Image: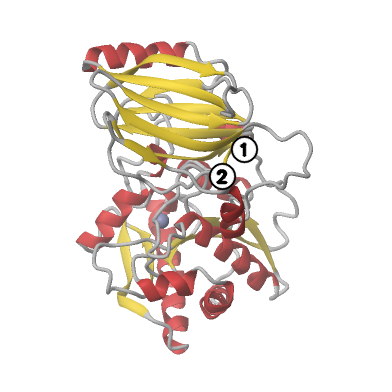
Amino acid sequence: MRVVFAYFYSILFTSLFGTAQTSAEPDLGPQVTEIRIWEHPSYTRLVLEVTKEVKPEILLISNPYRIVLDLRQTEFLVSMARQEQVGVVKSFRFGLFKPEVSRLVIDLATPSVVARNFILTPSDEKPYRLVLDFRPASDEEFTAAAVKTRATKSAPDRTEESAPLPHKDDVDKKFTIVVDAGHGGVDPGAIGKNGFYEKTVALAAAKELKKALEKFGSYRVVLTRDTDIYLPLKQRVAIARQVAGDLFVSIHADSIKNQDIRGGHVYTLSEKASDKAAQALAEKENQSDVIAGFDLEEHPADVSSILVSLAQRETNNSSAKAANSIVDEWKTRGLTLLRKPHRQAGFAVLKAPDIPSVLVELGFLSNKEEAYMLSNASTRLPLIKALAQSLHNYIQTTEKPQK
Ligand code: ZN
């Protein structure tokens, strides 16, 4: 029997990520304090230790095979690090999926169904335990179970409508920059050499960039997310359009196999990728909705075809100008850049047809020095300052387009 413990002490977690609530806060929802998995001959058992009784909503999703647990107002106080495969469970991750709903996404090594699902009440100093047994199934059985879970879902998945959208106010007065922190919630993005998550670095950098841009005094800056929450790719684009954005900047810090490679770089949209690495990164980024356990059969992500329309082509010229402006400013300031720092590929998040859009990779979390540099506000500052200045330079050369 193989047991995998994936737990952390809440104090350590709080000090690292600052997301846990303090015990003084009233009306705390359930908290997951430990997750265990082990393999039996005929099933794989997953146990969640929780401080209060929980009633999970269970979904089975195919392409790829996943089992998803939605838990209302539940906080995870365990480490999120992906672990080795145990039984039919290939890996799992969790985080905020939408306001008040945390999601646990279990990637399956083989199609499997939930054979048993029950909660044990506290006993022998053990808290509540949510127990789920997964049993391998045929593709047909999985599909039938998936259809059933979708049909019995308590409420329609209204993710796109339920997330808070910024208000559309004084739209015509100021040049609006939409800053998008990549990943978030149940989608951690890359996991750095130092254990930091891309979603955390991206959010911190996005907030700092907002501040830096606001110092110019003439811009309205809107964040697509300002908390650790998952946002579908389509919704990021929708927010940019809803607030009548004039420029969309998505912030990332990915990782690659070669750990020696480092340096910032910028992507713009193109049907044809400029190189294999850019293509691979776009494919990885476009998987965000799958990673978050989004049911693409219910919500097509519209990432398969990156057809560039005529209107888009004009926008793309502006996107390229913005990207070049970023590269120029970083060069001027002597910051580390990747070879060929402006590349193109089919990123779904850059698809707003009427808003110039760039995806900025601040650096690589797979490179040790860069991971530490990006995880710290003071060492991130030169990058943020350069980015803000370069966007300002770009905006100076454009006229605000007519709405
Ligand atoms: Zn990313």
Query: At x 35% / y 44%, what residue is drawn?
Result: 287
Mark 1 C-beta closer than 8 Å to ligand 1: no
Residue 160: quadrant of the picture: top right
Seen in the picture, residue 61 relative to 220 is either above or below; the reply is above
Q: Residue 173 in the image: state x and y as whole percent.
A: 73, 61
Residue 172: quadrant of the picture: bottom right
Give amino acid for label 2: Ile
Q: Quickly name the residue at label 1.
A: 163
Q: Secondary structure at mark 1?
A: loop
Query: At x 62% / y 37%, what residue is drawn?
Result: 163
- Judge by depth and name the residue closer to the eye, 285 or 118: 118
Q: Residue 85 in the image: state x and y as whole percent.
A: 27, 38
Q: Is residue 326 left or right of residue 10?
A: left
Q: Is residue 158 left or right of residue 117?
A: right
Seen in the picture, residue 107 relative to 82 is either above or below; the reply is above
In this rendering, which labeled residue sits more in front, label 2 or label 1? Answer: 2
Q: Quickly name the residue at label 2.
A: 229
Mark 2 or mark 1: which comes first in sequence?
A: 1
The reply to whether residue 390 is in sight is no
| Name of the residue lying farthest toward the front | 124
